[in-house]
Amino acid sequence: MKTRLYWVNEIFYSLQGEGARAGSANVFIRFSGCNLQCRRATEGFDCDTEFTSGTSMHQDEIVHAAQALNDRSGLILTGGEPALQVTSDLVRALRGAGFAPICIETNGTHDVSAMDLDWVSCSPKTAEHTLEVKEAAELRYVRRAGMAIPRPSIKAKFLYISPAYSPDGVTREDLAWCIALVRDNPLWRLSEQQHKRWGVR
């Protein structure tokens, strides 16, 4: 009997470029679709990820595709917004295939507490009162020059500020602003999209 269908943009093997797990090897499963449309006029930056296209895949097809890349690494569920599709059944199947830790990158607008994940990385893009995630391993907020330090409603061990990335890269102004935010607020750390500087996906 076939399992439910998921809409998957891509599955690939690379290094995590952001946050506390930066530099670690992982299989990435990028799910298509998102409930937000990040634009400079409202969020201060444009979304730089292509997640609109995709392929319909059953659970076992996803697991086999991930295993074929590396079944002894970590695994990151990303998007788009993976919480729109990911189920606890899929997480259990991936864990049973040997992946650990299993992580999710989410915008926080959907509760992921029942999914039995090992690591939740939340990058909020909407007002704090709209967020359904209550606890995370790390929070990553994107900032451009002039944007204030966040006041998170989510409890997290690691707090990160990331300069906004554009097709031309990070501007000196945005980077300098984020460095100053971290300097003036030492509970926070700076995180960049290092994978783009490394030349990996």
Image (tube, rainbow, N blue to C red):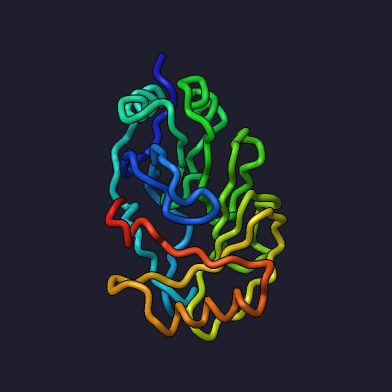
- Where's residue 194, x and y in %? 39, 59
- Where's residue 51, x and y in %? 34, 52
User: Is 198 placed left or right of 129 in the picture?
Assistant: left
User: Is 27 placed left or right of 188 in the picture?
Assistant: left
Q: Is residue 169 above or below residue 132?
A: below
- Where's residue 170, x and y in %? 37, 74
Q: Is residue 185 above or below residue 119?
A: below
Identify the residue shown where x is 31% and y is 51%. 201
Q: Is residue 155 above or below residue 8?
A: below
Q: Is residue 126 above or below residue 135?
A: below
Identify the residue shown where x is 36% and y is 56%. 195
Is 38 or 12 nearer to us in this picture?
A: 12
Quadrant where the N terminus lies?
top left
Is 155 or 74 nearer to us in this picture?
A: 74
In the orientation shown, which residue stands out farthest toward the top? Answer: 1
- Where's residue 9, x and y in %? 32, 44
User: Is 156 placed left or right of 106 in the picture?
Assistant: right
Identify the residue shown where x is 51% and y is 48%. 21
